[in-house]
Amino acid sequence: MKKRLGIISLFVLLFIAFIVIWNFSYQVGLEEGYIPIENKVSHTNIPSESGVFERAEFALEYANMPIDENHQRTLDTYYNNRAYYGAPPSIPHPIKDEKSLGGNACLQCHQNGGFVKQFDAYAPVTPHPEMVNCRQCHVAQNSNTLFKPSNLAKVHAPKVGVNNALIGTPPMIPHQIQMRENCLSCHAGPAAPKEIRVTHPERINCRQCHVPTDRVVSEITPFTRTNSNENE
Amino acid sequence: MYNSLSNRRSFIKKMARLSAMAAAASMFPGIMFASEQEEGIPEGANLDWKKGPCRFCGVGCGILVGTENGKAVAVKGDPNSSVNKGLLCVKGYHQTMCIQSKDRLTHALVKKNGTYVKTPINEALDIVANKMKDTIAAHGKDSVAMYTSGQSTIPEGYVASKLMKGAIGTNNLDCNARLCMASAVAGFLTSFGADEPMGCYEDIDHADYFITWGNNMAEMHPVLFSRILEQKARRGAKIIDFATRTTRSSTASDRSILFEPQTDLAVGNAICYEIVNNGWVNKSFIEKHCNFSKGLTKMGYGLEDKYKFKDKPEKIDFDQYRIFLEDYTPEKVAKYSKVSVKDIKYLASIYGNPNKKVMSLWCMGVNQHTRGTWMNNIIYNIHLLTGKISQPGNSPFSLTGQPSACGTAREVGTFTHKLPKGVVMNPKHRELAAKIWKVPVERIPSKPTYHTTEMFRAVDRGDIKFIWTQAVNPLVSLPKTSRYRPAMEKESCFVVVSDVFPTPTSDVADVILPAAWHIEKSGLYGNSERRTQHWDKMVEGPGDTTPDAWMFIEVAKRMGFGDLFPYSKENHVEEIYNEYRQFHEGKKHGMAPLEVLKKESGAIWPYVDGKSTQWRFNAKYDPACSNDEDFHFYGKPDGKAVIWQRPYEPAPESPDSEYPFWLNTGRVIEHWHTGSMTRRIPVLHKAMPHAYVEFHPEDAKALSIRNGENIKVTSRRGSCVLPASINERGLPTKGQVFVPFFDENMLINDVTLDAFCPISKEPDFKKCAVKVEKA
């Protein structure tokens, strides 16, 4: 009798413990499920500064990725796809849904890249995935003919390999970086044109060594010493 | 990970091939890519590579300079240097480009009837020596002064000190490192009794958390930051940026915490409060290895001439310290620091977690502070309370600004109170100096005279009649240049400026001496991690350019001190270093012999029995520990480090209704300090052509200021007009503006305040009140 009572009370205890623990874990679960509405960004974003680190989490993968030599892009195809040097690239492939917007369509492939069997190519990665109305700037190519011929001459893009200030110093950045602050999106990964693919993507703080040189925004005049006693 | 960079050798190949390929590319478009580029290229151009340290910041990267036909044509990172492992930054890679600048000072210039006349160097040195002698004869030893630099080499600092203190017998010697890390020194001396970090850069490879205190490492110590980023990517180490301004470093960090200027003192104490209150104190460590002390408070800010202060340390016990901390609960501090309670607790929990290794890093944010010594003490308090110190990865790490602020300014001691070993106030230290210098001990005065700010005030007052500056540009870098520029222009003071380029300081000189640049002379630098690095002369300097050390020696000879400076022109660097080494003999500060430094990419002192000591005060690594315990803080007589009770005190000048903004000043990655070198490097000038005033976007909006618009920044001292910068390089907190000080055409130091830390005498360039208006 005593034994049975003991066993019963043991089970009762276990049951109570179960209820308590289950209740507790349920409550905890609820807490985790609740997403407080607060600004999660711990710092204000400065595009020109933070962009460079944006795909840093993939840097090591890029460094270790074998090169798929059969599906590399070249700088030529890269620039052929632009109306002029610095223009947003046009869309060289058919588009499924004319009404679609970034997140549902373009970004599926262009946010992180990857191989697209249909086009036998790697999708280039956009440096600005936060802008989802892609076709505001990127146009489709639906015809090969011109409405009227034009005299527009394409400005030549800077050449690769001649951008060093001294022998062996890191090449300077020959292009503007507005909206292209994230270096790794174009200079690393399988879709990066082979001539400009960086050999050391793991370095991530690109502008530690590479200086921007294309500052169209502010005209640079030779520095003059305003208070000097130039004399010799 | 460094593969690609140890490949830098092939980079040169690549370059040569690339220019060939660029031509080929027009014929065969699209054929260039990495693997093909490697092939068929002959071993690079006929470059001769020589090793040395970088000319710029205190990180002290190893560089290799490629010379061809007597010209420096290339720079690369030294893969053998454990500091940078082959990597450099924008300044480092392009450094040698400035020496070819067209306005290089190639000959001595002597001012005659208001114009500068090209003069043979020997004549100019005669003039300097005679003037110095005459001034001493007429006005006494203390009427002549020398102001040198954390960019002076070890031999330069050594002969400067020997000339002023040993030969002439005045303590009128100070250097720009006073503006840079005097607070760090005072922090080390008060907390540990021994200067310079206990750890080394290898701490980065071990730490789990990096907490940066008011420090934009991505721009100011970029190579070290890249080592931190590497640890973040590889091991998931975390970076927490604690600052008053959002910068490139903040955007790379895992968390950015912003605070109201000056309240770092309070937040630091709040972290200590949390550590004590939550039982995170490492009790056995503080019982065995720590004392508690308090000093004087309400010290003032040194704003008046001839201000004097001497701290009176007083021992306290742990309970008194605990009670003191009760004023700094996170809840109380959050109110005025604008740091949330949660963030304070978060920071404290990182330091308090016994299983995580924490590295604190700081530089000018903490040092250029009217309570800079206190702030250094508080960071050490945090590490001492938790016992996280002197072990790989657990490291309070005070970063240095200049390439030899440690090697020259701190170790040789080019401060008014310093001797190569110890201080002038200590008779034993004076005796040692007198013995090695072979001068009568009475000649070395026992009282310190002018620290930097006071030195230029003395020039203004007319007390100093002769000043010689070397490798320094005070009329751009001093606080409140609006007072000190007119002071230097006064007829009462004869100004000699040794420099490589003309600067606003050389503009007021009576004699300008043409200095040899870094690689145009041999020398030694000492970096932030106690690493001494040697380099040999690599190229000839143009014209009459002469190494600074040799100019000092020549003047000393002309003044009749030739027997004290028996060095040869060819070998003076080696002879001086060997003499200097005698000062530091022993296990606590032994310097590596020259043969080792010539062979290796630097060695860390204490260099004992052929080995660098990476972690001082830890018996496992440091042979100088002698108390049979795990740790021995042998800088203090009783072998114990000091936890200081240091309160929060407000800044000397805070924004008010008339001057509503904080002004913060600082640097940018492209430029080195006052820009006299880096602005003459075309790539760097193009990337950062002028200074700017940075606004928080909301402040800009409220004042309807557009990007690029000229803005006049005015304080009670002066004003400066600069273009506005909104959402560009950095983002100050609301109510604050930021201006970099490199631009001699936009002298922001006309605006700053010459208040300083009463203990370290280091000015605060980070805080004063200004108003802004459209210009």
Image (spheres, rainbow, N blue to C red):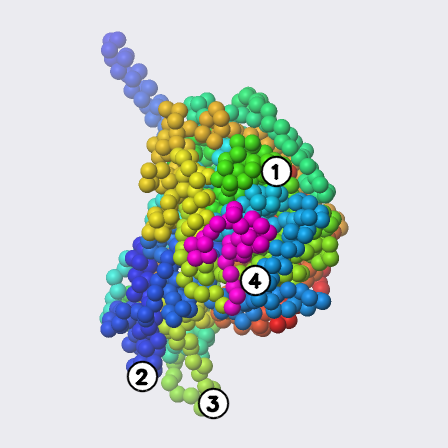
Within 10 Å of disc 3 (Cα), the crowding (few <14, some 14-19, many 20+) is: few
Residue pointed to by mark 4: B122
Residue B462 sits above or below residue B271 on the image: below
Q: Are marks 1 and 2 on the same chain?
A: yes
- Residue B738 on image: x %, y %: 61, 54
Q: Which mark is residue A228?
A: none
Residue B241 sits above or below residue A167 on the image: above
Q: From the image, which quarter does the C terminus of chain B lie in?
A: bottom right
Q: In terms of secondary structure, where does tag 1 sit?
A: loop
Residue B563 belongs to the span the image colors magenta: yes
Residue pointed to by mark 3: A151
Q: Amino acid at mark 4?
A: Asn
Within 10 Å of disc 1 (Cα), the crowding (few <14, some 14-19, many 20+) is: some
Q: Amino acid at mark 2?
A: Met
Residue pointed to by mark 1: B445
Q: From the image, which quarter does the N terminus of chain B lie in?
A: bottom left
Residue pointed to by mark 2: B27
Give the residue drawn at x 40%, y 57%: B536
Within 10 Å of disc 2 (Cα), the crowding (few <14, some 14-19, many 20+) is: few
